[in-house]
Image (spheres, grey):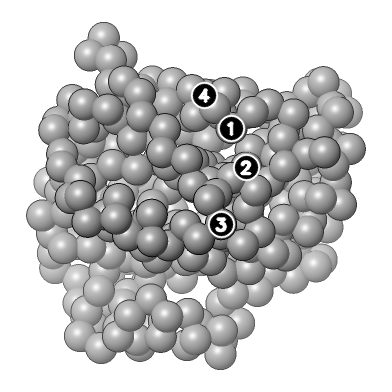
Amino acid sequence: MAKIQVGFLVSYDYKLIQNALPPIYEESDTVFLAIDRNRRTWNGEYFTIEESFFEWVKAFDTKGKVVIYEDDFYKPELSTMECEVRERKLLAAQMGEGNWLIQLDSDEYMYDFKKFTDFLKSHNHYLKSRKPIQICAWKVNLYKYVDGGVLYVDKLDKFMLAVNQPAYKVGRHCKCRSVYTDSIALHDCLSRERGELVQKLENWGHNTDIDKEAFLHKWDTVNKSNYKTMQGFFYLEPMNWKTLEFMPGANINELLVNFRKTSKLSVSSLFLAMKNFGQWFRMLFK
């Protein structure tokens, strides 16, 4: 019987797992935490993980679902993106092909995970496909914490969440047929202390793709008072994230409650139907 296998890539922002693990724990068969055994990032920088983190995981894992998977994920001859793809494939091999392979980052918080896994279970026939299929969800990108809340990107961003085969090409993207669901995550993308943000920008898979100085200048400048007067916030092509909005909340749980009071955590059935028909039609000719 196919399992719901979830894997997290754990690195310098490991503390965020304490937000990301609880929402997915009950509906997962196994949860893998992939950690570089030498505590190195994809860019070769060293990081540390406090022993208290592993103590927290052990105390939280009351059903014995969590597996700590340590390996050498940094290869100096590879780019950061190549290291990322390699780690994702190694992690998928541990998770076991033939199951639903769900990979999350430490800063992605799924709050409707049962709905997502119910969708996967109702589509187990995809696991028999000879072609890779990726199941997509949507995320709200949190940009910067400010007084009383957070500035977030005013558009939902798709992300590849589950696959039937780990044919990763760029990050989690398999460059294959996408099936869209209406599940949504909060993504603690760039909303962190400045030093932690710089660490992320220097060590993630996109580290060579961005103008770090220009991006950080805008990130430093924007605040609760002036965000409506500014545009262009994406780290690659700025206008892909054209505008920001403000959501009040002192922590992730308060933010979630407040997001749910709006229409920001919803995707229309018509929009999904059009996206999925487009993917199905496009793949007819491949």
Residue 278 showing in the rendered view: yes
> Between 177 and 41, which is closer to the camera in this rendering?
41
Which kind of residue does numbered mark 1 sit on? Met
> Between 141 and 44, which is closer to the camera in this rendering?
44
Q: Nearer the viewer, mark 2 or mark 3?
A: 3
The residue drawn where x is 84% and y is 27% is 129
Whichever of labels 2 and 4 marks the residue nearer the N terminus, that label is 2
> Between 43 and 262, which is closer to the camera in this rendering?
43
Which kind of residue does numbered mark 4 sit on? Lys
Q: Are marks 1 and 2 in contact (CB under 8 Å)?
A: yes
Residue 119 placement (x, y as % from top left): 79, 56
Q: Which mark is residue 95?
A: 1
Which kind of residue does numbered mark 2 sit on? Gln
Residue 243 placement (x, y as % from top left): 39, 69
Q: Which mark is residue 63?
A: 3
Q: Is residue 278 above or below residue 268?
A: above
Q: Nearer the viewer, mark 4 or mark 1?
A: 1
Which kind of residue does numbered mark 3 sit on? Lys
Give the side of residue 152 with respect to residue 165, left or right. Answer: left
Q: Which mark is residue 5?
A: 2
Q: CA distance from mark 3 to mark 4?
A: 26 Å
The residue drawn where x is 37% and y is 55% is 57
Q: CA distance from mark 2 to mark 3?
A: 15 Å
Give the side of residue 117 with respect to residue 5, left or right. Answer: right
Label 1 element class: helix
